[in-house]
Image: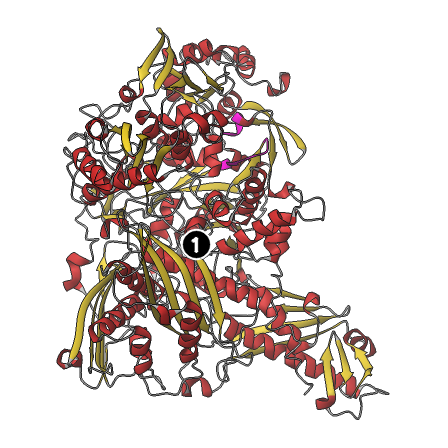
Amino acid sequence: MNQFQYVRPTKQKAAIDALAKDTSAQFIAGGTNLVDLMKRGVMTPQKLVDINKLPLNKIEKENGGLRIGALASNKAVAEDKLVLEKQPLLAQALVAGASAQLRNMATVGGNMLQRTRCYYFYDTAMPCNKREPGSGCGALEGINRMHAIFGFSDKCIAVHPSDMSVALVALDATVLVSGPRGDRRIPFADFHRLPGDTPQKDTNLEQGELITAVDIPDGPFTKNVHYLKVRERASYAFALVSVAAALSLDNGTIKDARLAMGGVAHKPWRLNEAEKFLVGKPATEDTFRQAAAIAMRDAKAFKHNAYKLKLGPNSIIQALKNATAVG
Amino acid sequence: MADENPGTPPENADHDGNRRDFLKKSSLLTAVALTPGPVLHAASAEWDEKVAAAFEKVPLKLEVNGVKHKLSVEPRTTLLDLLREQLHLTGTKKGCDYGQCGACTVHVDGERVNSCLRLAVMEDGKKITTIEGLANGDKLHPMQEAFVKHDGFQCGYCTPGQIMSAVACIREGHAGSEGEIKEYMSGNICRCGAYSNIVAAIQDVKNGGQKV
Amino acid sequence: MPKQTAKEGAVGSPMHRVDARLKVTGAARYAAEHSVAGVKHGVLVTSTVARGRIKELDTAAAEKVPGVLAIITYRNSPKVPGYSDAKASNNPRVEGQEIKIFYDDQIHFYNQPVALAIAETLEQARYAASLVRVAYEQQPHQTDLAANLQQGTEPKKEKDYARGQAYAYRSAPVHIEQQYGTPIQVHNPLEMHAAIALWEGDKLTVYNKTQAPKLAQKDLMRMFQLPEENVLVHSPFVGGAFGGSSRIWPQETAAILGAKHVGHPVKLMLRREQEFNLVGYRPRSMQKMGLGATPDGALVGVTHEAFGNTSQYEQFAERIVHPTKSAYHTLNMNTVYKVVPLDVSTPCWTRGPGESSGSFALESAMDELAYALRMDPVALRLRNYAETDPENDKPWASKHLRECYERGAASFGWSKRNPTPRSTRQGDWLVGQGMSSGIYKSERQEATAKARLMADGTLLIQSATADTGPGTGTIMAQIAADASGVAPENIRFELGDSALPPAPIQAGSHTATSVGSVVHDVCVALREQLQDLARGQAGSAFSNTPPTDLVALNGELQLAQDSSKRVSYQDILKQQNLPMLEVTRQSKGGPELKEHSGKSFCANFVEVHVHALTGEVRVRRVVSVVDAGRVLNHTTARSQVLGAVVWGIGQALMEQAVIDHRYGNFINHDLAEYHVPVNADMPEIDVQFIDKPDPIISPTGAKGLGEIGLVGFAAAVANAVYHATGTRVRELPITPDKLV
């Protein structure tokens, strides 16, 4: 690991200033992903701005919703009473991720910003357009069983690894950021990017912008929710495919639905068409099967991930079944 | 230099006492101070050892197993390497160095964390408990006793991490059932496969009602 | 000879580990944790091509890093004297020429060490290593076994085998012929390989993790052309090995060369990704199995063909076809095994080496044959039960496999199984049950031990064996207690040091038999000397007592008929004016070992749940019944089988090191992407032992335990998955993508 400067501001402005003009600087909060990447030389910031002293870890009611501070730990959010009551899907998604230790360390903001687990991104000896623009995509013609089936480009077929973000995109969350040019709100669905020609950019954050909180509007999804994570071992593994499903049911009829997938795209993948289809339909396996088929319309596989074309819809069906079965 | 204002963390580049002090002694680095970032990086290869060491270390106050330490560390030093290489507390193990095995689990202010992914400077002012700090003198902690009793290990390398994690698992209230224990202990890999015995040890301590 | 106190003895008791306290308090010191004054830190730089030569090497930036003492490459490295001698660079256990560290510009595999950065601190060394620039002239490489089968050759150490008619299965009334594959499996012990090397003049001390202090010492003597007394290998605790610490690897050599170059001790720990290339792995296998039987299930012919990979510079062969040769009675059998040299590092023994890959094919094929015959898989195995070893017609040293099947089936509830695939469902999960059996060699090698009775009555036993986790020191104390009459808490067993009396490698499930036997023998000899001293002592109460009337217990000799007549070991020494009594014995067993076939056996019964939609497989229930002779310690023995089950689950469901053949390296080279089982993967595991002493292999009655529980296990899982789903997965691991 290279030498770097370390600063620990106590004021938000100082933190933002520290990054504003310095493209080689990074915020560090939990550090669970950044330190890992620095050890491997994948990221080499010259300055770390430790934001843990900023007062950004509150979880509170705000304007008909929940406001979760960017520095709230994954554990704190997953076990928070308000979260469990209002947004159980988020709690389920958080608990499905990582390990108890990592959830103690990892923050909400950091979780959103974690980098892909693509093998080629992680290994500096391999080509990767995300890590080193122009070097090529190792996965495209390589081992791509973990890779995207939606929204990829010929520059990058990596997937976003966060579980939490899959729930947040389903729940219509908004990301609050503060930067050199002031504060702004970014709808969660617009927070992460598709790779296009610039896969090095994971998100639409601008230089020096700091995530301060996430807002989640209150909704009817307090009961019939399920986060399904399919992985190769029972815990502590990244998803092959995951599904966040939230239903609002009235006598077996779907009043409202939210559906998003993880492990399938460069960003948490919201399934808007399938959601629309579900509304007004009976909550039956047949309905779910049709919704799953709609969800997969644009999916395209590579050499090793064709199984996702089957696992994806099957996981959607199962997640919806599980969500329906609750209560 | 660090003694002048020990334990005060650098608030930002301009208020870094450690650095300010150093700047008095060296005009060479003035330019560096004005334009940090990449220039600093470029410069680092040119510095002689002494200059670099003085510049790059920051003060750190830590309490480890009840012992207070005033240290001066490089920001890139992880808590794990600090414990093992500088404080010679080798009970905390390095199993992967990437947060993927749990062997390095310690408690920071009572919470279990992977010490390999913590920069030591980030723990300024905090209380660290490692496996060496768990027993009460010669008297083993109930979890250590239970690991012995239930043969919760073979080679012993993951054991300190498992025990630190197991204690936290009960304290967190995640030892309510066998299934819950298995899930909340899944961040600690045991390649020898002592998992069932580890679960038995945790259940024993939990059911025994001893204070952990 | 005094009476044994077998019933109440220490052997067989579930005694806690003698080193338990050290391990639960963090006081046990592993390779990188020894306190060595003035130690410097080394970090390896490894190649990023699989074959070629180093074209440019730029260490200037790295050398300028503060705290750096040296960057060692082939250009400035001290010489390894043995490298210039073909004989000295041949490891006697593996055909060929071992990899030469910092020797020339040639690259033979990906991640081959090309430089070592040595600095005052670990952080400095790591950073310096990242600044070493190496350019390669790349040459085409071959890393794909499937694409290179035509390069396969019969290994020098594993010859083809035939009895009766080859390929007889083809003409049998019922036959199956299938291909099976197992991926590269990496030991991945939790402790990453590490070494500290220290030169004092021409004396070399190495702290490392080894399963074999004496073999490590011999390797180093051979490489550095040093006499035995100049090489010390110290390895008191080993954080998991599983075969991966069975020889000297690059990290030891690099630390030694580094220490020589900088004139300070050097410590070096591999990074997790380097564990995949630098310390061996289980080779990939591609196998073909043909089984033929009469309609009533009698095997007519068995053929097993197997390919495995090795490196270009060494020929590593394993016992992949061995289970097939001995498992079942059949008159016609042939086995063919070929190894294919690839541009990869040399594989190495990995828990259940060969047998566990080979038995996956054999035991899967037996299940397929059972279905073809519409016969119960247990019944098929019993129908072909081998009363003698089919490979050589020798009588078994002992075999209680029938009882394993019976007890396992009963405990598991096998009779209630509906054999039809996909017939049982619980909610969203398909339920399947499968079984297999396992066979693994049981042998005894030559070993030496020293017993020293101290004036205070405590007993020190020494032997240069290792404890990689099975609990060697614990069972040795138990064996020594029963044989010597000293209470186990007064016995200390020293291992893990090459200066101790020679012992074989801890591998191949032979530590309990080899070292256990000599510990038994040396303690019997010690006790006999004590008896002689006691009986010979002027005025002794025992002077006319025949030795058979003396009981050795609790550090005393007692008269069997009247335990009030007794003399303590301390008093015997005191009366003789002896500061201590020391005995050394070497033992290797007699001709009876050659006249019998020694094997351990097991029967595995497994229940899996397979998610009907997602294809996730969870092992829910395991019954493992093991015939490993007498159980020396029920606690540690059970733990070993638990560990084998965990390994079996890993092998069956998730472990595979994947090579991107374009680059010739593993791409999932860390513990987040190479999955080993976690706690949540654990099923309910019922471990049972037959616990009948083997009369041949060792005087303690033990056979071997470390591997047997793993042999065949993956097939039991695969068979259960077939029963659950109707899908037969013949290429491990059984990941969801293969079932969805």
Which region shows up in magenta?
B109-122
Up the image or down, A167 lies above or below C25; here it is above
Residue C218 is situated, as x and y percent measured from the top left of the image, at 46, 65
Look at mark 1 in the image and give the residue it sits on. C682
**Amino acid type for the residue under numbered disc 1:** Met
Q: Viewed as shown, does residue A146 lie left or right of C2?
A: left
Q: Quadrant of residue A153?
A: top left
**Rendered-image quadrant of the N terminus of chain A:** top left
| Residue density around tag 1, few if under 14, some if 14–19, many if 20 or more, within 10 Å | many
Q: Nearer the viewer, residue C77 or C565?
A: C565
Local secondary structure at mark 1: loop
Instruction: Answer whether residue C38 is visible to the viewer in this image.
Output: no
Label 1 chain ID: C
- What's the image's color scheme? secondary structure
Q: Position of residue C680 (x, y in %)?
A: 43, 49
Q: Position of residue C489 (x, y in %)?
A: 69, 65
Q: Along the line of sight, which residue is nearer the eye, C264 or A82?
A: A82
Residue A265 in sight in this render: yes
Q: Residue furthest front?
A: A251
B111 in the magenta segment: yes
Q: Position of residue C492 (x, y in %)?
A: 66, 65
Name the quadrant containing residue A87.
top left
Residue A42 found in image quarter: top left
Residue C250 colored magenta? no
